[in-house]
């Protein structure tokens, strides 16, 4: 009997599936840039060679950076950052959280599913505001960098239900001290942890596309620290929202792979309405497996990585895998398809957004370099 054989693709994978049919619309796919390849770590060499979407995106970004119109747009954006734009930025983040909730398809962080949440890097407060408003009985706590250290101003408050502290989270050892259930009942407190701190530096980045310059230690330290803090404070079955970068730094690749065994499912979301062109996206961990995480020793490996960043004088020590075990070849064989599945969809969204921005000023570009 004839059956309908069309393949069902779950909503959270539709982006990834569309990558298989993906075609560039603005420029042709560039050939492999061998000089560029040489500057990449072993994992990114593989990604760049295997994914035409990534190759296209890298090329597109170069055109975008060189386009004088982009500079005008970014300068305008930089001028707008500050006190005057804090309210619109708050709104932007509320919309982003709405999209994250919607795109996970289970309304994970609304409809009173969240009882108590932790928001790391909470200012201006859009995520917190949206969660408080969409979970009538929930309470929350946020930490965010003080404005005098370059942090954003908080623009949201909900006395009685939400409390925030201006504090550099990396100075708060409490956050990463392990909380197991004990006789006093003081186990992890939160069913949702958001690790949304983004490191910013005014120093110019002289490094190549993926390598870690010395100052990137602070960024890497913040990434590991906020992840460890979130995992330590997350209850069994809880949800993690972790900010990620579209440039697949080895450190991020390791995090996404390591987290795959700590959650029932990982979903990548790049809010299309507000952040399509930016390099960030969010990794959502659903249904936290606390015991499994502890058995996997990920928490210890994160702590060891934090110690190493603080003690080593050698950059090369930080440019190799710190969380995953095995030779480079073993890591690639085990993890490359999984990493591609998550990243490719994000690269695609960003490429489409850049294409659309560029196409307003450039009709056809074929050999721009
Ligand atoms: C992209 S914003 C987060 C926006 C926020 N999720 C919202 O919904 O409004 C990143 C935040 O991380 C904060 N941040 C960066 N480094 C931090 C640190 N070491 N400790 C605490 N907050 C930090 C920044 O000040 C900024 O407020």
Image (spheres, rainbow, N blue to C red):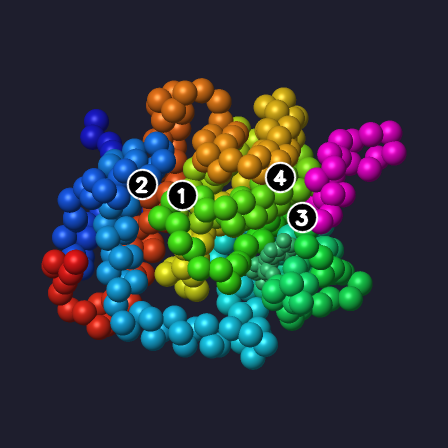
Is residue 142 inside the magenta stretch?
Answer: no
Dot 1 alpha-carbon crowd within 10 angstroms: few under 14, some 14 to 19, many 20 or more: some
Q: How far apart are the two marked residues, 3 and 4, measured between alpha carbons?
A: 12 Å
> What residue is pinned by disc 2?
39
At 66% from the left edge and 58% from the top edge, which residue is drawn? 144
Please, is residue 267 above or below residue 81 in the view?
A: above
Q: Quadrant of the C terminus?
A: bottom left
Dot 4 alpha-carbon crowd within 10 angstroms: few under 14, some 14 to 19, many 20 or more: few
Please, is residue 249 above or below residue 66 in the view?
A: above
Q: How far apart are the two marked residues, 1 and 2, measured between alpha carbons?
A: 8 Å
Q: Earlier in the sequence, mark 1 or mark 2?
A: 2
Please, is residue 228 above or below residue 100 in the view?
A: above
> Does the rendering let one see residue 200?
yes
Q: Earlier in the sequence, mark 1 or mark 3?
A: 3
Tell which tag, 1 or 3, sits nearer the viewer. Answer: 1
Dot 3 alpha-carbon crowd within 10 angstroms: few under 14, some 14 to 19, many 20 or more: some
Mark seen at residue 310: 4
Q: Farthest residue toward the front?
A: 313
Q: Earlier in the sequence, mark 2 or mark 3?
A: 2
Badge 1 element: loop
Q: Earlier in the sequence, mark 2 or mark 4?
A: 2
* Residue 280 percent coordinates (x, y): 45, 54
Pointer 2 with pointer 4, Cβ within 8 A? no
At 41% from the left edge and 20% from the top edge, which residue is drawn? 327
Mark seen at residue 170: 3
> What residue is pinned by disc 1?
211
- Respond yes or no on whether mark 3 lies under 8 Å from ligand 1: yes
Depth check, front residue: 325 or 273: 325
Tell which tag, 2 or 3, sits nearer the viewer. Answer: 2
Tell which tag, 3 or 4, sits nearer the viewer. Answer: 4
Dot 2 alpha-carbon crowd within 10 angstroms: few under 14, some 14 to 19, many 20 or more: some
At 24% from the left edge and 53% from the top edge, which residue is drawn? 59
């Amino acid at each position: 009997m004839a059956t309908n054989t069309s393949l069902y693709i779950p909503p959270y994978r539709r982006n990834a599936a569309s990558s298989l049919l993906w075609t560039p619309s603005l420029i042709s796919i560039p050939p492999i840039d061998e000089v560029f390849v040489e500057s990449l770590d072993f994992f990114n060499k593989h990604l760049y060679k295997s994914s035409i979407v990534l190759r296209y995106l890298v090329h597109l970004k170069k055109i975008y950076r060189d386009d004088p119109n982009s500079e005008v747009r970014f300068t305008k954006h930089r001028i707008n950052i500050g006190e005057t734009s804090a309210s619109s930025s708050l709104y932007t983040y509320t919309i982003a959280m709405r999209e994250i909730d919607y795109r996970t398809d289970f309304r994970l962080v609304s409809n009173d599913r969240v009882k108590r949440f932790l928001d790391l890097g909470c200012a201006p407060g859009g995520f917190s505001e949206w969660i408080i408003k969409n979970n009538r009985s929930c309470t929350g706590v946020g930490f965010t960098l003080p404005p005098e250290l370059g942090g954003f101003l908080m623009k949201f408050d909900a006395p009685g239900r939400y409390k925030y502290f201006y504090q550099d989270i990396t100075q708060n050892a409490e956050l990463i001290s392990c909380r197991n259930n004990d006789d006093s009942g003081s186990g992890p407190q939160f069913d949702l942890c958001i690790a949304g701190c983004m490191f910013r530096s005014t120093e110019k980045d002289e490094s190549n596309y993926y390598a870690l310059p010395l100052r990137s230690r602070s960024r890497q330290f913040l990434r590991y620290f906020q992840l460890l803090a979130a995992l330590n404070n997350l209850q069994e079955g809880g949800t993690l929202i972790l900010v990620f970068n579209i440039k697949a730094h080895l450190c991020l690749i390791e995090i996404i792979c390591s987290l795959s065994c700590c959650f029932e499912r990982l979903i990548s979301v790049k809010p299309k309405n507000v952040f399509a062109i930016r390099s960030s996206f969010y990794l959502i961990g659903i249904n936290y497996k606390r015991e499994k995480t502890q058995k996997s020793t990920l928490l210890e490996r994160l702590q060891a990585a934090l110690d190493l960043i603080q003690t080593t004088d050698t950059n090369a020590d930080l440019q190799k895998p710190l969380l995953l075990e095995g030779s480079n070849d073993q890591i690639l064989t085990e993890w490359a398809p999984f990493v591609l599945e998550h990243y490719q969809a994000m690269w695609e969204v960003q490429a489409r957004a850049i294409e659309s921005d560029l196409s307003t000023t450039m009709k056809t570009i074929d050999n721009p370099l």
